Amino acid sequence: MKKKKAHQPNKLPKKILATFFLLSAGILIYTGIALVKGELYVPGKHSKGILLHGAAMWFMAGAFCSAACVLLSEVVDHADERDNEWKYERFRLWTGRIGWTLFGCAILLHLYSILAK
């Protein structure tokens, strides 16, 4: 019979954890400001980016919040020394899927609003 190995909690450098925490805080602050203003700017790598309003803005805000949750879950997982990493992995997987779905919906709504004019 095999002996079960002792659990080894996640080990990430404090610099990476701090980066994840600050990025998630920045995303949430940016999203909050955008929602108060009523427009959310999504920068583009090879373009000027897009400015979202209305429903598209809310879907993208949900996507941004999902991204922040994924980053924060990594920080919380690091602090939690219990043998439950699979729960955090599952949370990140589903939160990521939800985030990408919201992102896609936001882009489609934005394109629809442009084409419907």
Image (cartoon, rainbow, N blue to C red):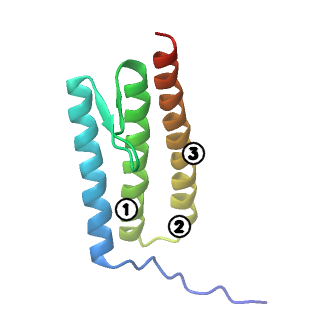
Mark 3 surroundings within 10 Å by alpha-carbon count, few (fewer than 14), some (14 through 19), many (20 or more): some
Image quadrant where one finds the N terminus: bottom right
Say if 3 sits above or below 111 in the image: below
Q: Which residue is mark 2?
A: 85
Marks 3 and 1, Cα distance to the nearest angstrom?
Answer: 20 Å
Marks 3 and 2, Cα distance to the nearest angstrom?
Answer: 18 Å
Q: Which residue is mark 1?
A: 76
Label drawn at residue 17: none
Say if 73 sits above or below 4 in the image: above
Q: Secondary structure at mark 1?
A: helix
Mark 1 surroundings within 10 Å by alpha-carbon count, few (fewer than 14), some (14 through 19), many (20 or more): few
Mark 2 surroundings within 10 Å by alpha-carbon count, few (fewer than 14), some (14 through 19), many (20 or more): some
Question: Between 41 and 94, which is closer to the camera in this rendering?
Answer: 41
Q: Which residue is mark 3?
A: 97
Given the image, on which type of amino acid does mark 2 rest?
A: Glu
Which numbered disc, 3 or 1, marks the residue that appears first in the sequence? 1
Give me the residue at 28% from left, 60% from top.
21
Taking 47 as reference, is 93 left or right?
A: right
Question: Between 14 and 111, which is closer to the camera in this rendering?
Answer: 111
Residue 111: percent from left, percent from top: 50, 24
